[in-house]
Amino acid sequence: VPHVVTDIRGILSVTNDAFSRLTGYPGSNRPNVFDLFSSDSQEEFRGLLRRMLISKQPTGSRGLELIRKDGSRCVVELG
């Protein structure tokens, strides 16, 4: 299961191997987390991240479109 630790600015401080396999970005070359989402999904992700950081609790699953390093897209569920 991909796992990340990010701050409100989208800076990824921790990722795991599953994240690297999903996105195509190796651990040493992490993009800003907001750059991983399509324009349609970025604002929804920002709101989800704000709610999670404020409540410190999962906020429910959301299907958001993620853009991999190779340009392919997939829908990810976040909580």
Image: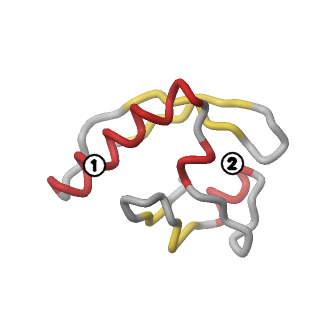
Give the image quarter of residue 54: bottom left
Look at 69% across and 38% down and name the residue there. Answer: 67
Q: CA distance from mark 2 to mark 1?
A: 23 Å
Q: Is residue 27 above or below residue 43?
A: below
Name of the residue lying farthest toward the left = 55
| Residue 59 in the image, given as x and y percentages of width and height | 24, 41
Name of the residue lying farthest toward the top = 40
Query: Which colour style is shown?
Result: secondary structure
Q: Is residue 25 left or right of residue 7?
A: right
**For the residue labelled by badge 1, is the local secondary structure a helix, a strand or a loop?**
helix
Tag in front: 2 or 1: 1
- Residue under pointer 2: 22
| Residue 19 in the image, given as x and y percentages of width and height | 62, 56
- Residue under pointer 1: 50
Q: Is residue 48 left or right of residue 70?
A: left
Give the label on residue 37, or none: none
| Residue 78 in the image, given as x and y percentages of width and height | 42, 40
Look at 54% across and 48% down and name the residue there. Answer: 34
Look at 50% across and 30% down and name the residue there. Answer: 41
Disc 2 residue crowd, few under 14, some 14–19, many 20+, Cα 10 Å: some
| Residue type beneath disc 2 | Leu
Look at 71% across and 30% down and name the residue there. Answer: 73
Front in this rendered view, residue 65 or 61: 65
Q: Is residue 76 above or below residue 31?
A: above
| Residue type beneath disc 1 | Arg
Lower sequence index among marks 2 and 1: 2
